[in-house]
Image (cartoon, rainbow, N blue to C red):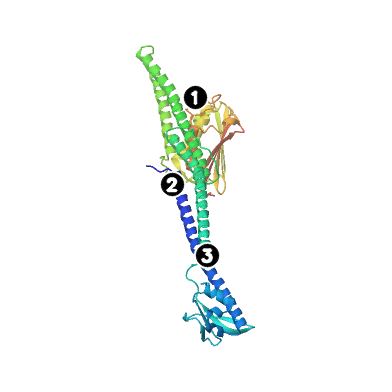
Amino acid sequence: MRIKIQQRLLLAILTAAMLAVISMFLIMQWNLGRGFLQYVNTIENEKLSAALIQAYTESGGWDFLQDDPATWPKSLSRLMTGGMIDGRLLLLDENLEPIFGNIGEKKGDQPAPLTHDGKVVSYLLYQPRNEISEAHQLKFVKQQELAMLLITGAILLLSIAFSLVVTSRMARPIAALTEGTHRLAGGDYSTRVEVTSADELGQLALNFNALALALDNNEKARRQWVADVSHELRTPLAVLRGEIEALQDGIRPADPEALASLHGEVLHISRLIDDLYQLSLFHVGAQTYRKESLDLPPLLWQVVESFRGKLNRAGIAVSTAATPAAGATVFADRERLRQLFTNLLDNSLKYTDPDGLLEIALQADKEQVRIDFRDSGPEVPPGELTKIFTRFYRVERSRNRELGGAGLGLAICRSIVEAHEGTIVAEASPLGGLGIVITLPLTGVTT
């Protein structure tokens, strides 16, 4: 039979409580017997010493001890005949010679002096009791043991009640976490557990809720990813299918123009699949980087020059500026940075209005290099700036699918920059369009 955690906690607490209570009872019982016996011996010793001094005073010496005990003073006779002393004493004179008693001296015995009028008149050796034998004393000990037993039982009952409360309070959040884990494992990512304390269990509940939220968001992102990929592939495939069916039905002749249209759709699908593949590699950490120390400005201007003809044909002027002009050294993958700059330039080429302007500025300090891409209209609404690095995201009013790609270029740019321990942000361009700001750490600034 499987034992629940509440039962285990209860059993552990009760076992510890019972061991503590039983140990306490045994120690108290031992201490009571020992302490009470010592108390009885002390009282007897004091009474005997007082009775002997009183008898000495009344008799004027110790000679009476050799007489018939019936003639002894009442104070001493009552102690001797009552069984309290019972031959457990040895009385010595001032020269330590025996006067009365025969218990013998043991090595280490220290006789106690008896004084009268400030003068030592004798020494007393008293052998204490080894056990309690008087009926009234035994009755008292039994009463105390019964009281301790009742106290022990009460403490044990209180421990049981307290243990039930504590284990119930501890097991309740654990049971809730267990149930929540089962639901979470079953795919119910909306599962949350109540946080009832600020201790480790409360922190565990907070972590569980954070995990459930992350899984819920990941599941929503996965579904959105599948939906976006399906949507992006559906349109070019539908166009491709329609054109092929038109060729098959003879509605459209299989001339070079038709083949070029088919080829264009295939290229569009190929580019989309390549982008998806690249992005998936970034996300799973499987993208290979061959980093080296390289001078960043020449690479940037080389990519810009390769686009200058396309930008001019699109009616987009290009302005460049660099500070310092000599360049800055970064530790990076040359081809990935080339891909980064290509995607940004391609983004401006697709979305900037004709007769527009693209400004590219580079500046460096002792720690990092900053690259600004600023283009003219159309404007990106301020609320959209934080979303443009999201996969498949496009500002539909001005930057739509007919003008460009599937909305993966900037997502790939963010992955490349983050892989180089840099940052990339979007802001409103002073030229009226979109501004992209990239910062990369430097390995050194050349002069």
Q: Position of residue 398 (x, y in %)?
A: 55, 25
The local secondary structure at tag 1 comes to: loop
149 w.r.t. 377: above or below: below
Residue drawn at (47%, 56%), measured in percent from left and top? 22
Give whichever of discs 2 and 1 has the lower sequence position. Answer: 2
Q: Position of residue 37 (x, y in %)?
A: 51, 68
Front residue of 198 and 366: 198
Front residue of 426 and 7: 7
Give whichever of discs 3 and 1 has the lower sequence position. Answer: 3
Estimate the spatial distance between the alpha carbons at disc 3 and disc 1, rounded to whole Å: 105 Å
Give whichever of discs 2 and 3 has the lower sequence position. Answer: 2
Q: Position of residue 288 (x, y in %)?
A: 41, 41
The answer, for residue 15, to whether it is visible in the render is yes
- Residue type marked 3: Gln
Q: Kindly report which numbered mark, 2 or 1, lies closer to the viewer in this rendering.
A: 2
Residue drawn at (47%, 40%), measured in percent from left and top? 175
Q: Tell me the residue that label 1 is attached to.
A: 401
Front residue of 315 and 244: 244
The answer, for residue 337, to whether it is visible in the render is no
Q: Tell me the residue that label 2 is attached to.
A: 8
